[in-house]
Every structure is written in C-alpha cells, then in structure tokens.
Amino acid sequence: MKKKSITAASVVAAGLAVITMVTGFFMIRPDKRVYCEQALKYTLGSFSLDEVSADELHLKQADADSMKVSSELMLVNREHPLPEEYAPSLEEYKDSGVIMSAFSVDSFAELSKDISEHTGEKLYVMSSYRDADEQEEIFDEQGSSTALPKACSEHETGLAQDLYFESYAGAAINKCDGGRYLTAHAADHGFILRYPPMETDITGIDYEPWHYRYVGMPHAEIITDNGLTLEEYIGSLEVGRYYEYGGYIISRQQGNTLEIPEGYKVKVSEDNCGGYIITAKK
C-alpha cells in the first residue's frame, strides 16, 4: 500500500516543529503543544495495511442496489462534490435542535459522554448539518480558505461537526482539558480531525482543530494513528484489494456487484469516487 509522500518543505516544517517540542515542550501553551504534536504526526506519518488474498476469504456476491448503503466514508471536497441526487440521512441529537447524520448520532453521544466523564467538561456543537443554501452563504462570507462551495462541504452530509467547549472555541479549543481529550480520543468513537496542520495542500482547508468528521471504525483509528487525511486514506485503498486490520476486512470496490466476505458483519459505504468501501467485522 502507498506510503505518505514527504516534500522537502514538509520535512523542514516538521523539523521546526520538533525543535519547538524539544526546547519548549513543557513551557509552551498546551494548545500549541498539541499543534506541534499533530504537525509532526501528519507530516511524517506513513501508512501500510496487511493485504489478504481473496482466495483466503469466503466471498459471496451482493448487489449494491439491494443493500443498505451508508455515507460514512464519502469523500467530499472541491474535487469530489456531492451528487445532485444526494439526500443525507439525518437525525436530531438528543432533542437539542442539532441535526446530524443518523449514521453518527449514537457515536457522537458516546464521545460526548466520554469527554464529560473524564474531564467534567461538556462538549457543544457550534455547527453541524447545513443545507446547500446555508453552505453557499457561509462560503460567500468566509472565502475559500475556511469554507467550501455548496455541494463540496461535509456539513451537507451531517457527518461533520464544528465543536467547542464553554469559553473555548475555534482555534482555542485545545486550551481546555476537554479539547485535548477530544483530540486524543475522538478516533475511539469513529471521528477524525478532518483538517489537520500542514496538510492544506491536500485538504484545501487550513488547520481547523474544532472540525471533526465521522468515518466509523476502524477507519478513524487507522487514519488518526497513521497521520493521514481522508483523501490520502481513501486514495491508498486499491480497488479490488482486501486488507486486514484488527479483526476487520476492508475492501474498496467498484460496480454494483460486490464481493462480500461471508461470516462477517458487513457495512457498505459510498466513497463518492465512483465506488464503495466495504467494512467487514468478525
């Protein structure tokens, strides 16, 4: 499987981050320390998964059109806008008025509870689902460095949330214990930091420590542990291959006839790149 490419500029940037960490690790503000740690991880991260032969799996054919297909692993950006016919599956979060993807609402509740139990701080949602008109208005107001045109934003899927804690929002989110716990444990509940530092050339968006995206397990763990963007992760899953990770089988496939491992609990998500990603768990 492909490894993350590293440019000379990114190596220099990572080196500066290392110097900052070594010389002032315990002196700089906690949020700056988190930034340095993330910059290092996302700049120098590498990626590999164990490949398993299709011959080793008992596969059966399944018609994608007859299956319940989710959107958890849809890649949504300028190069991969949402299809005109796309309609998100939405649900209200705990009578809060916050609307998010039905695929992520239970996991978000678990994440919020986890943070509260370990830090005593409450997690709030500043922005979640937006329709196309709302997204267009925000793009016109904020511009392309912090917002995306309509049909190109994950907010239109309900899978993305802009998060905050009382008195700690935006770039300041990691100044509080709750924010740092979120950064460290979001992946345990299927969420990833969608726009990490030093990756603007890939994501098209500057560092946003408050913006989290649901991708489910084990993908959140793989992406976070290996310092990847969602673009890099999906691009590294070669079509027709099968990968094994922690009791899961992962496969990216194209066409309506899917090859599904038997004896596994299977989830299928669109990738918004012309195919599907199969996640099978024993």
Image (spheres, helix red, strand yellow):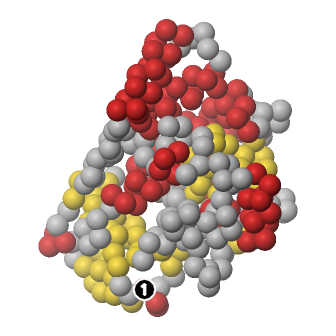
Above or below, comparing residue 227 to residue 212 in the picture? above
The answer to whether residue 168 shows anywhere in this view is: yes
Residue 96: image location, x then y, percent = 84, 59
Residue located at (57% from left, 27% from top): 34
Mark 1 surroundings within 10 Å by alpha-carbon count, few (fewer than 14), some (14 through 19), many (20 or more):
some
Residue 277: image location, x then y, percent = 40, 70
The answer to whether residue 158 shows anywhere in this view is: no
- Within the image, what quadrant is residue 159 found in? bottom right
Above or below, comparing residue 84 to residue 209 in the picture? below
Q: Is residue 112 left or right of residue 264?
A: right
Foreground of the two, 250 or 137:
137
Residue 174: image location, x then y, percent = 67, 31
Foreground of the two, 13 or 131:
13
Residue located at (40% from left, 26% from top): 12
Foreground of the two, 90 or 5:
5
Residue 102: image location, x then y, percent = 66, 69
Residue located at (29% from left, 75% from top): 261
Q: Is residue 249 left or right of residue 265?
A: left
Q: Secondary structure at mark 1?
A: helix
Residue located at (83% from left, 32% from top): 167
As shown in the figure, which amino acid type bears the numbered disc 1?
Ala
Residue wearing tag 1:
64
Q: Is residue 254 left or right of residue 107?
A: left
